[in-house]
Amino acid sequence: MNSSATTPQPPTPHPPCRPAPAPHGPTAPRLLAAWYATGRSATLADHLERHGPSPVERVLTGGGSTSLVAAVEAAGLTGRGGAGFPTARKLSAVARRHGRAVVVVNAMESEPASGKDRFLLAVAPHLVLDGAVLAAAAVGGDTVHVCLPRDRSIRHEQLGAAVEERRRARLDPVRLCLHALPHAYVSSESTALVRWLNGGPARPGGGPPRSHERGVARRPTLVHNAETLAHLALVARYGSDWFRQAGTPDEPGTTLVTVSGAVAAPGVREVALGTPLTTVLDRCGGPTEPLAAVLLGGFAGAWLPAADLGTPFTRGDLAPLGAAPGAGVLVALARSACGLTETARMLAYLAAHSAGQCGPCRLGLPAVAEDFAALAAGRADADLTARLRRRTALLPDRGACRHPDGAARLAASALRAFRDDVERHLDGDACPAARQAPRVPVPPAAPPETWR
């Protein structure tokens, strides 16, 4: 898996760090530049040769923390973990609190269809760690906690080696700690990470206080996705104007997208925000057969009919269609597959992987999953679609976290995108594709063995 971009001439380095030149332009790789150039994971020496020393000392002295937050705000960087919240606002909210802050790197990537954070940590671990250390300097933090799922031992070993490289080089003024957490779908939610680091289960926590007010060890806590922090490290080095050379005026920068399904070369690609969905698929070799739809954002995302593939990959352009970039997932579904069957399998997984802490997760999600399974099998009763629409409308904004909202969004989008198939299945005539082998990989629909 690598970036499919070309490498034009680099910009003038952003002072006063004097880093190695970085690629620029709307199609150039940024996060994956070193990987694209060498085809191997970057050691600390490789990282410093390409990007130069971290500007952390500048951030720690002379009002640099304020200037870094201002640079991130001017860059327009938003979170790449799913919600798309402005990064500078999260930094400012933590920096304004009293007491030493904590930074948490969310590298859980519990979305089954996503592989971008795993790939980024494998090929450019020091870019992520740089961003975490810089964020800690900006908010007055002294500790960085990096959260990984415990069933990815190889990734834990690789990142542990990167942390040890930095320790031997005495590179960072803050403490870096790695943690291996239970791997459940909702364990990547920010409050679940804070709850686990405080000795509790890796389940989302609802209600106040919020993490930026009182999080890990009751200290102000900044939680950011791994990719977001890697972008922050680049903004700190090259500046906001450089960051805005890619993307759109409203949604600048590049983003990592995990492309899978009916494409010739699935994998992780770095694309400029605003790139049409069809162009993203073309960079993965194009569809291998005619498409019925694409899944945007992952299992908590939305299906879009193939007719919408000209839509730019931005939050603003996708919102009117009921979709969002989410976790940077794009799954191409062939016309020969059954979208209702694939959706039923995803909903069963989401129901099994809920935290089970509130009514929408304990009762609503299983009911929606069961109804969708009946629809996919062609054994629906006359009231099923009305019942599904009613239940999916009731799920959002009622849970302790946003897990029910994502499941409802997936189910509702499937009823829209596969409308013709719904009519056929309601007539008791499940399409032939419903009996074929699954096309979208879905983990077993079994509850996590442990939350601690």
Image (cartoon, rainbow, N blue to C red):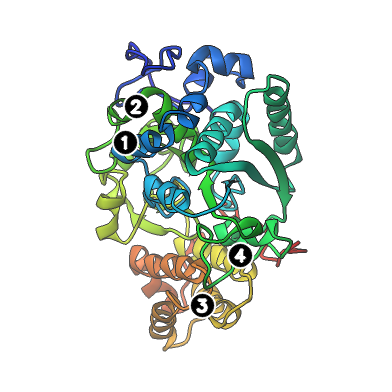
Q: Which residue is mark 3?
A: 368
Residue at the location (62% across, 28% down)?
172
Q: Amino acid at mark 3?
A: Val
Q: Secondary structure beneath disc 1?
A: helix
Label 2 neighbour load within 10 Å: few <14, some 14-19, many 20+: many
Residue 170 position, x and y percent, is 68, 22
Label 1 neighbour load within 10 Å: few <14, some 14-19, many 20+: many
- Looking at the image, tell me whether mark 1 or mark 3 is earlier in sequence order: 1
Q: Which residue is mark 4?
A: 349
Label number found at residue 239: 2
Marks 1/2 in contact by CB < 8 Å: the verdict is yes
Marks 2/3 in contact by CB < 8 Å: the verdict is no
The residue lying furthest to the left in this view is 249
**Residue 307 showing in the rendered view:** no
Q: Marks 1 and 2, how far apart in space?
A: 8 Å
- Looking at the image, tell me whether mark 1 or mark 4 is earlier in sequence order: 1
